[in-house]
Amino acid sequence: CTLDSEVALRVGGDFFFDPQPGDCPVNLVLIAGGVGINPLFSILLHIADLHGYQEGKGNRHRLGTAKLYYSAKTTSELLFKKNILGLMKAFPGKISCCFHVTQQHSEICEELQPHVTGK
């Protein structure tokens, strides 16, 4: 977002991301803490499927980017972190993530270091 950008927020409840062919592309910012990642991880998988389908079959979905901000006490509590890193590698520039840990006392593994903030 830039200064004066219009954004929509949704907290809790039933939510989903179901873009239709021909919809204008939107950039998503997904924010999760702890086990709250579950529905957002499903959305990320859906976005990855659409990106993969788009690249392979040339469908009419026009997708923006997806940025996930995900916080937990420690890196061991970051659910699906390996899967999320895999999605970032598979779709660079389209899917990205920033992990934030609040109570990490041990070293952060090398693979996660570029994507982790906090301590």
Image (cartoon, rainbow, N blue to C red):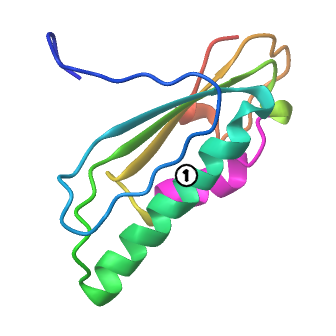
Furthest-front residue in this view: 14
* Residue picked out by circle 1: 43
Residue 114, given in percent of the width and then of the height, sits at: 53, 34
Q: Is residue 22 above or below residue 12?
A: below
**Is residue 98 toward the left or the right of residue 19 in the image?**
right
Residue 104 magenta = no
Residue 19, given in percent of the width and then of the height, sits at: 35, 58
Which portion, as a residue range, is magenta? 78-89
Element carrying mark 1: helix
Q: Nearer the viewer, residue 42 or 82?
A: 42
Residue at the image point whose x is 59% and y is 60% from the top: 86
Furthest-bottom residue in this view: 57
Residue 108, given in percent of the width and then of the height, sits at: 74, 29
**Is residue 93 toward the left or the right of residue 97 in the image?**
left
Q: In what quadrant of the picture does the N terminus appear? A: top left
Q: Nearer the viewer, residue 99 or 48?
A: 48
Residue at the image point whose x is 70% and y is 10% from the top: 119
Residue 65, given in percent of the width and then of the height, sits at: 32, 47
Residue type, numbered disc 1 = Ile
Residue 111 seen by the camera: no
Q: Is residue 54 above or below residue 90?
A: below
